Amino acid sequence: MSAEDESTFADVFNGLTMGGRRRQRDRVEPAPQQRKETAPDVPPHVPQPQEEENAASVRAYAWTGGRVRSSCRLEIETLVSTTARAEELMHTMRSEHQSVARMCRQTRSVAEIGALLSVPLGVTRVLLDDMAGLGLVTVHTNQTTGDGQPDVDLLARVLRGLSNLRG
């Protein structure tokens, strides 16, 4: 019999009282092997279209405070320009107000502003309404024909402006 197979009286006794298993003396359990794991190659996070849409929705909501209607009537052809007050306060305004004030240094239509900001027209209208209330932009009255229809020349100008945005 080898030294490993020899059992003492205590081993036999403990085996009977500890569930019937024999304890092997001086048996060394091998240490679990440690596996070195490397992080998989993960490409940098690229926003997916759905994530970009969600971000734009959150941004629009933050800009308007959740409001969806403006208090004044702003048609897509309504022209807007920056005021002297906006120029004076440019560095103290919210970033979205600064963006609009810069682009409206040249008179633009509501549709052009919305397209340049990449936000829905409803958001554009609320933003412009807020800015008009603060005296940061001037909302020009729409030119209409005798029957109340928008001026064709104005609509052509708006269409040209939108076409120029596409490049």
Image (cartoon, rainbow, N blue to C red):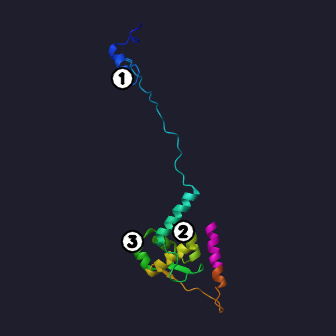
Q: Quadrant of the N terminus?
A: top left
From this viewpoint, which residue is outermost toward the left? 10
Q: From the viewer's perspective, is the residue at label 3 or at label 2 nearer?
A: 2
Element assignment for label 2: helix
Q: Quadrant of the C terminus?
A: bottom right
Report x, y in % for residue 72: 52, 83
- Of 46 and 38, nearer the camera is 38
What residue is shown at x 61% (from left), y 68% (from top)? 165
Q: Is residue 15 magenta?
A: no
Segment tinted magenta in the rendering: 156-167
Say if mark 1 contacts mark 3, CB within 8 Å: no
Amino acid type shown at disc 3 = Thr
Residue 108 as seen in the image, left or right of residue 9: right
Q: From the viewer's perspective, is the residue at label 1 or at label 3 nearer?
A: 1
Label at residue 92? 3
Element assignment for label 3: helix
Considering only order in the chain, which callout, 3 or 1, is on the residue closer to the N terminus?
Answer: 1
| Residue identifier under label 1 | 17
Task: Report the Cα–Cα distance between label 2 and label 1.
Answer: 81 Å
| Residue identifier under label 2 | 117
Report x, y in % for residue 50: 57, 58
Q: Is residue 120 above or below residue 14?
A: below
Amino acid type shown at disc 2 = Leu
What residue is shown at x 49% (from left), y 75% (from top)? 67
